[in-house]
Image (spheres, rainbow, N blue to C red):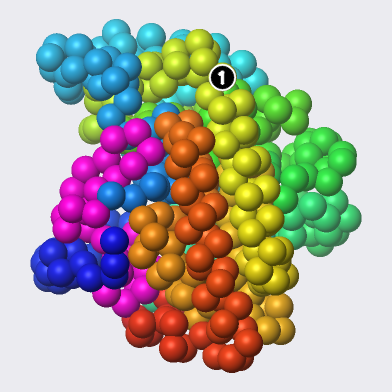
Amino acid sequence: MGTNLPRSTQADERLHRVIPGGAHTYAKGSDQYPEGMAPVISHGLGGHVWDVDGNEYVEYGAGLRAVSLGHAHPRILDAVRREIEKGGNFIRPSIIEAEAAERFLENVPTADMVKFTKNGSDATTAAVRLARAATGRKLVAKCADHAFFSTDDWFIGTTPMNAGIPDETTEAVVSFPYGDLQAAEELLQRHEGQIACMILEAAAAVEPPPGYLQGLRELTTRHGVVLIFDEMITGFRWSAHGAQGLYGVTPDLSTFGKALGNGFAVSALAGKRELMEIGGLRTDRERVFLLSTTHGAETHSLAAAMAVMDVYREEDVIGRMHALGDRLAAGVREVAAGIGVEDHVVVRGRASNLVFGTLDEQGKPSQPYRTLFLRELISGGVLGPSFVVSAALTEADIDKTIDVVAQACTVYRKALDAQDPTPWMGGRPVQPVFRKHA
């Protein structure tokens, strides 16, 4: 395939002229890819995408984990086509809003009510606002080990990209480490009666320690704190019912998105009726402006979500992703060990949500080595900022990926021996998303 992407390079410049950052999500920015090797996508089908230069790739992390069933899934498209012909948005709720909500609550029986919106940030921020209103408290406790919760000020102010956010906003947020129940208890005791909610992913790169989530549930209940699970990733990857269904722990509120629509824009805030109704019309309490979005209930997106839930009910999508991920992880580890880089190219996470680490000679995470590795993957026809699988990948796709990783590990070994990846980087290193300066 080679590494020459002239049309993508031109298209990327075109994107940067009219869109700040050249993409609508920072994680899709060209700075996340090796220099001159940021493909601009033309189309996708199943587990593959094609760039504007005509190159075909096996794709991982599709749509930032949103496309779990594969691109242009026929059942999802059929459902969308049927619904959109009836109109997409009206002056009053459409009946599909009730149907989609009922279907969702059947799928996530730990929740009593749900409200749909278009993106995860709106859902998590609504959950935080609701928790503050319900408790009359100010502080938000977020898990320090989970990378992203919202584009809104309460979260972004805690990252290095905090320009434009008042200090007093950030001062209302405290942090706790994942998996450490004692640290969570100490935080709640230190800020007794001040913390409105604790928000975290039930699991991410590591599984919850035994009893951790159950202990967190007990702690938050005892201290009058709202427990929020961000299920944007874990929902429809850990189980069709989310991580809360898998681990048997019921949060007060939870947020879903990404795979819920298989690429169509739909996310959800779900939770206990006594909380959710504070944002409704059947409450005696002071009302919360919970979620009010013009496009939050677009009919075709809700049709997509219902079709996704149908596919999950009828097919073992979770089992398929785990089988593919297990095979991929085993293959990558085997070839890395065979080439002597198993301590430097590492695979982590649940089989349905694999990420890879690129470590330097001292075993520390390295952006230069990540650049080298990504460059070799792309050159071999694998587009993979992670190893997050979709159910549309095939056994042959996994085999090809392992072969390409083997080639990448050979180059990685050369760079380690030279103690310098620079000759194999092809330019500047890829960059972390959260940084002060471009």
Residue at image location 75% in from the left, 30% down from the top: 247
Tell me which amino acid carries mark 1. Asp
Residue at numbered disc 1: 316
Location of residue 180 in the rendering, given as x and y in whole percent from the top left corner:
83, 55
Location of residue 33 in the rendering, given as x and y in whole percent from the top left corner:
37, 69
Residues packed near mark 1 inside 10 Å, few (<14), some (14 to 19) or many (20 plus): few
Location of residue 153 in the rendering, given as x and y in whole percent from the top left corner:
44, 61
Residue 149 seen in render: no
Nearest the camera: 430 or 216? 430
Nearest the camera: 301 or 378? 378
Residue at image location 33% in from the left, 50% down from the top: 57
Assess whether residue 35 is covered by the magenta stretch.
yes
**Would you place residue 18 above or below residue 429 in this image?**
above
Q: In this view, does 345 lie to the left or right of 299?
A: right
Residue 380 seen in render: yes
- Image quarter where the N terminus lies is bottom left
Q: In which quarter of the image is residue 382?
A: bottom left
- Give, as a single range, the part of the protein colored magenta: 28-55
Q: In which quarter of the image is residue 325?
A: top right
**Would you place residue 331 above or below residue 168 in this image?**
above
- Image quarter where the C terminus lies is bottom left
**Would you place residue 33 above or below residue 204 in this image?**
below
Residue at image location 27% in from the left, 74% down from the top: 36
Q: Label 1's element?
A: loop
Q: In this view, does 256 lie to the left or right of 351?
A: left
Residue at image location 27% in from the left, 56% down from the top: 24
Nearest the camera: 386 or 341? 341
Assess whether residue 352 is covered by the magenta stretch.
no
Q: In this view, does 47 lie to the left or right of 283?
A: left
